[in-house]
Amino acid sequence: MGSCLLLQALVLTALLPVIAYGNCDFPAIFNFGDSNSDTGGWHFAFPNQMLPDNAPYGRTYFGKPSFRYSDGRLSIDFLAQALGLPFLSPYLQSVGSGFEHGANFAASGAAVRKTSTDFNAPISLTVQINEFKIFKQLVLDPVSSKASFSSLPSAQSFQTAIYTIEIGGNDFDYAYRKLNLSPAQVKQTVLPQVAQSVAAAVQELYNDGARTILVKGVGPQGCGPFWLTYFSHGPNDFDKIGCSISYNDAVTFYNTQLREQLSALRKQLPGADIVYVNQYDIVYDFFANPSNYGFKATTQACCGAGGKYSFTWGAQCGLTGTVDGRSVTVGSCSDPASYIIWDGIHLTDQANRLLTKQILTGKFFEPSSFSISNRCQIQPF
């Protein structure tokens, strides 16, 4: 019995990130976003209602579902590992959480702007910012501070932490599926307001003491199996690597809007690093030059079934549904590391790893003068 418990402890220890506190100017990360960076926020708010609550999600790294939309880690997990920090606990996790080195306010399905409550998640970016304000208020409350809460961040950590925002994709989804807008219409009626709302959130965080804020642009949606199968495309809507021109064009339009908003903010907010992270170009290059990264499958889902893109909306990863007229329980591919896309929408553990490595080179930051590696001893991951 004792040897069995020891073996379990060793396995769990092996899964934990390498932690090297003190080698980085950033003692904490506070993250805001959607399913691309949600490490359990939705699960703890609405248990057992989402795909990543079930296998085969989490199979590659955690060996079980970890409430993340991937077979393993997300980019935010790799960033934490790179900075020598533990994985971020979801803000809504009541048991087993540790907030000494930050907190994750992201929730799957979240949009920047409030959408109707029957579409995706009610935990919008505005809600997440308000959750952060309450969290900080409680941590710094003089009554609470009399107790010994070693699992909470210090007052200094709120000033010197990295704040990360990765959100926006669901605003596109809502506009396309709920409002029935085309990519051209979305560009004119929705996306400028979304970019302005993200900038307003950055302003709020700055007003609350944040001084290093990284904002990720939206990735190339038009290369994902969901976007290629759920929406109709004309014969001339595909580029040379098979991605949708119109849907990617809407994303690049939004990212330009976002960059302009952040550029204007930099001039207004002294003493702050307001950084745009160009993840679109990184991920698009995965699709354009897959062999450079060890990928063999590009626009196909690892965990999916049906058709050219291995994806069927009614039979998603881990579920049982009808594919080509027969009932199928959808499993995953044998080698997720050779795929870019895990479940038709989200990246695999390997794609998230390579994305984060590229981000940390500093080549995709605006302004280019910002560097994480100059302020941290980057840990291997």
Image: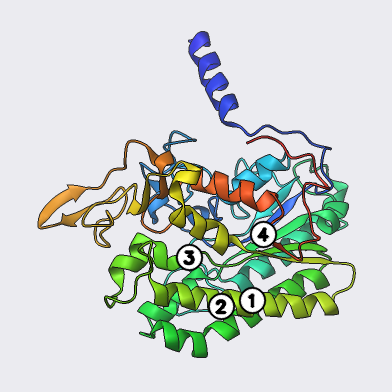
Q: Earlier in the sequence, mark 3 or mark 2?
A: 3
User: Circle 1 sits on which residue?
Assistant: 258
What label does residue 234 carry, if any?
none
| Residue 96 percent across, percent down from the top left | 61, 40
Q: Quadrant of the C terminus?
A: top right
N-terminal-most mark, 3 or 1: 3
Task: Give the side of residue 117 with respect to residue 151, left or right.
Answer: left
Q: CA distance from mark 1 to mark 4?
A: 15 Å
- Type of amino acid at the residue the image marks with label 2: Tyr
What's the image's color scheme?
rainbow
Q: Residue at x 77, y 80 (%)?
A: 264
Name the residue at 80% across, 70% down: 206
Residue located at (56% from left, 44% from top):
353
Q: Which sits in the foreground, 30 or 290?
A: 290
Q: Of the numbered discs in the image, which one, if any, rests on residue 364?
A: 4
For label 2, the residue is: 254
The span from disc 3 to disc 2 (Cα, nearest Å) is 11 Å
Q: Are marks 3 and 1 in contact (CB under 8 Å)?
A: no
Label 4 secondary element: loop
Q: Earlier in the sequence, mark 4 or mark 2?
A: 2
Residue behind mark 3: 220
CB under 8 Å between discs 4 and 2? no
Position in image of residue 363 (x %, y %): 69, 56
The kind of residue tagged 1 is Leu
Q: Quadrant of residue 9?
A: top right
